[in-house]
Image (cartoon, coloured by chain):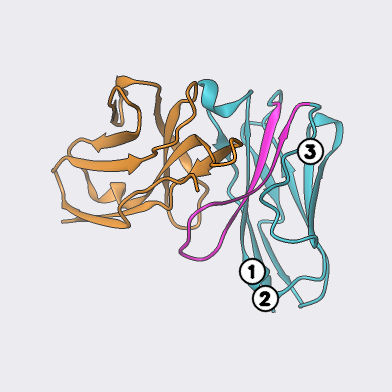
Amino acid sequence: LAKTTQPISMDSYEGQEVNITCSHNNIATNDYITWYQQFPSQGPRFIIQGYKTKVTNEVASLFIPADRKSSTLSLPRVSLSDTAVYYCLVGLYSGAGSYQLTFGKGTKLSVIP
Amino acid sequence: GAGVSQSPSNKVTEKGKDVELRCDPISGHTALYWYRQSLGQGLEFLIYFQGNSAPDKSGLPSDRFSAERTGGSVSTLTIQRTQQEDSAVYLCASSPGRVLSGNTIYFGEGSWLTVV
């Protein structure tokens, strides 16, 4: 069964760099990898998207190895306001050959003062 | 509009009643998605509309759930004979095209459904 895997939770102190990895063994060949941030009682918000290698924007960096079977979201110098749930989104091929857009189960990041 | 709009934002209904949830996507977006999120849980795919193609209904949990998209714009998710396990946030999202070809998916703030 095609799926993505993320750590359930992570803790970090303010000012530290946080790396969250998502595993996606059956990623579709031509699909991008996207990460979202969700605060309580809000819809998910786009953070960053990439296809391969490294992408950086004003909020985060995304590292994707050559085989694209995983991706790592990197948040530099986190602050208390980065406390949220982070989801990866990829297109995956199932065992039956069908394609499905799949969110990870989310990683709850808690930033500690 | 500026973003994906959903209504109602909150709905409390009695078990066994039908409910309709509305989604107004970003103007011009051809793709529209419905997801369900139970308290403290991840995002569960329900249904996907892309242009005039037949929708992907593979995520609908039972035949009590249905959705339509009229005129390629507004969508309505209908839950018939609601059950307590249907209580969740129902999130709608839209994107300019196929989301994982470089297009970004934008979410609404959700419709919070409580079945009592």
Percent position of residue B12, x then y: 71, 71
Quarter location, residue B64: bottom right
Neighbourhood count class around disc 1 (C-alpha, 10 Å): few under 14, some 14–19, many 20 upward: many
Residue B74, numbered label: 3
Mark 3 vs mark 1, foreground winner is 1
Please give the range of residues in magenta: B30-51
Label the magenta part by its dominant secondary structure.
strand
The residue sitting at 44% across, 36% down in the picture is: A26
The amino acid type, in three-letter code, at marker 1 is Ser
Report if residue B47 lies within the magenta region: yes
Quarter location, residue B115: bottom right
Structural distance between the alpha carbons of marks 3 and 1? 23 Å
Question: Are the residues under badges 3 and 2 in a single subunit?
Answer: yes
* C-beta proximity under 8 Å, tags 2 and 1: yes
Q: Would residue A15 be found to the left or right of residue B68 on screen?
A: left
Residue A32, numbered label: none
Report if residue A3 lies within the magenta region: no
The residue wearing badge 2 is B84
Query: Chain B is shown in which shade?
Result: cyan
The amino acid type, in three-letter code, at marker 2 is Gln
Output the letter for the chain in orange: A
The residue wearing badge 1 is B87
**Residue B103 seen in the current view:** no
Q: Which residue lies furthest to the right in this view?
A: B71
The residue sitting at 66% across, 50% down in the picture is: B59
